[in-house]
Image (cartoon, rainbow, N blue to C red):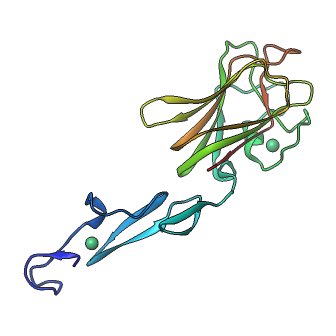
């Protein structure tokens, strides 16, 4: 098992079989298959815990290891996109929020780049006190384009929980289609969290 050709000793004409490339190999859901000489191993994918065949969502906010960037950032005060994944869910306005530059044309986005692909099925969004973003989308990069995961309209809440069919992705975007009722030209995001489920 695990080899093809004559004999079963390395260097005696055996060639390893890449079991991971075979359609008959199935590590189970949310796993990573790694080919080895003479065999293969299955492990739970990043973001999942347990054993292959029963890998469960680890419940960790994947955004914490992501790099945050934005389409534009206000230079008026300190509105860095790094505030969206600093682990602080504060909805305070000062030095705790990303805010787009002004004047700019909407949509404006803030993006999380994960170091490795993650399965995302839930997003938690926190915005600034008094500045609930009225309309925004959540989208995931599928390698070719941005796929819409959730769309929020007529929002007046500072905290939104958005759930959707889990996707495997390397990048997540919040695309603000407007600002707040108070300031239509400014979208403010204080924290963007991403979970498997
Ligand atoms: Ca192998
Ligand atoms: Ca924050």
Percent position (x, y) of residue 125? 76, 37
Q: Which residue is at a point 21% across and 69% down the rendered structure image? A: 17
Note whether 139 is above or below 154 in the view shown. Answer: below
Residue in the picture at 85% in, 14% down: 181
Where residue 55 sits in the image (x, y, percent)? 54, 64
x and y percent of residue 169 in the render?
51, 43
Residue drawn at the location 78% of the way across and 17% of the way down: 154
Quadrant of picture, ligand 2: top right
Vertical arrangement, residue 43 with respect to residue 123, above or below: below
Q: Is residue 37 above or below residue 145?
A: below
Q: Which image quadrant: the N terminus?
A: bottom left
Q: Could you say which is closer to the camera, residue 41 or residue 191?
A: 41
As drawn, is 39 to the left or to the right of 73?
Answer: left
Q: Is residue 195 left or right of residue 132?
A: left
- From the viewer's side, name the closer residue of 13 and 50: 50
Q: Is residue 52 left or right of residue 95?
A: left
Q: How many marks?
A: 0
Which of 94/26 is in front? 26
Query: In which quadrant of the rendered view does residue 128 lie?
Result: top right
Residue at position x 36%, y 62% in the image: 26
Q: Residue 33's spot in the image, x, y percent?
A: 39, 64
């Amino acid at each position: 098992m695990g080899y093809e050709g004559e004999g079963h000793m390395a260097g005696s004409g055996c060639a390893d079989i890449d079991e991971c490339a075979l359609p008959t190999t199935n590590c189970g859901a949310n796993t990573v298959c790694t080919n080895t000489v003479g065999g293969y191993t299955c492990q739970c994918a990043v973001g999942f815990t347990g054993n292959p065949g029963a890998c469960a969502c680890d419940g960790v906010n994947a955004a914490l290891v992501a790099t945050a960037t934005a389409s534009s950032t206000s230079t008026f005060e300190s509105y860095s996109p790094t505030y969206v994944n600093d682990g602080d869910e504060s909805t305070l306005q000062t030095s705790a929020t990303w805010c787009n530059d002004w004047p700019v044309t909407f949509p404006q986005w803030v993006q999380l780049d994960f170091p490795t692909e993650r399965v995302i099925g839930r997003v938690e969004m926190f915005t600034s006190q008094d500045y609930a973003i009225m309309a925004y989308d959540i989208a995931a990069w599928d390698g070719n384009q941005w796929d819409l995961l959730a769309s929020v309209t007529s929002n007046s809440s500072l905290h939104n929980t958005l759930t959707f069919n889990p996707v495997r992705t390397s990048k997540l975007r919040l695309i603000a289609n407007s600002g707040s009722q108070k300031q239509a030209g400014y979208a403010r995001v204080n924290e963007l969290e991403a979970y498997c489920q």
